[in-house]
Image (cartoon, rainbow, N blue to C red):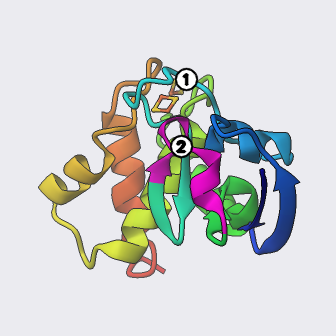
Amino acid sequence: MEIQFFLNGQSVKTEIQADTLLLDLVRAHGCYSVKRGCETTNCGLCTVWMEGKPVLSCSVLAARAAGQHITTLEGLQKEAEEFGRFLAGEGAEQCGFCSPGFIMNVLAMERELVDPSEAEIREYLEGNLCRCTGYMGQLRAVHKYLHRKETR
Ligand code: FES
Ligand code: FES
C-alpha cells in the first residue's frame, strides 16, 4: 500500500507492506538514529515522536504513520547536540547506543512537563535502558539541562 506522511517536516510518499514497522520505515528513509534494541517495547532505543508524542517505533505499524508527523533525532539536531553536551559532561555517554532514544524522551519531557519533580523525571524516563553507565549520570545531566537557563 502507498502512504504519505511527514518525516522531520518533509512530506514522504512511499510503498509499505501491511506488516512494516515504523522503525523500519524511518530507517529506510535515512533516520539511522532510530535503533533496534529489544523489539519487545522494553528498551526505548527505537523512540520517535508521532505528532509530538514519544512512541516505540518497534511496536507501531508503519501504516499508522499515514498523514502523521513523525520526528526523529535527525529533526532535532540543535537541541540534541545541546543536551548531548550535558550527557558527556556528566560522563553519562559511553557507547552511546541508548542516547538517541533517551534524548528523544528527554526533549519530549521538557515540552510536556513543567518543572518536573525527581519522581516525575524518573517515571517519564523509566522506559529507557542503558547497559553502560547506570542512571545517576543521566539524571544529573537531565537536571542540569532542565535548569540550564537559570544558571546562565
Ligand atoms: S527496540 Fe523498541 S523498545 Fe526496544
Ligand atoms: S551508553 Fe551504552 S547503552 Fe547507554
Residue drawn at point x = 78 percent, y = 50 percent: 1
Q: Position of residue 112 (x, y in %)?
A: 35, 74
Q: Position of residue 147 (x, y in %)?
A: 37, 72
Residue drawn at point x = 53 percent, y = 43 percent: 101
Where does label 2 land, which residue? 101
- Name the image quarter holding residue 120: bottom left
Residue drawn at point x = 84 percent, y = 65 percent: 12
Residue drawn at point x = 42 percent, y = 51 percent: 141
- Name the image quarter holding residue 135: top left
- Element at badge 2? helix
Residue 86 visible within the image: no
Looking at the picture, which amino acid does disc 1 mark? Gly
Q: Nearer the viewer, residue 67 or 110?
A: 67
> In this picture, which residue range is highlighted in magenta?
55-66
Cβ of disc 2 within 8 Å of ligand 1?
yes
Where does label 1 land, which residue? 37
Looking at the picture, which amino acid does disc 2 mark? Gly
Q: Is residue 59 magenta?
A: yes
Q: Nearer the viewer, residue 21 or 46?
A: 21
Q: Which mark is residue 137?
A: none
Category of crowding for the residue at label 1, using alpha-carbon neighbours closer than 10 angstroms: few (below 14), some (14–19), many (at least 20): some
- Element at badge 1? loop
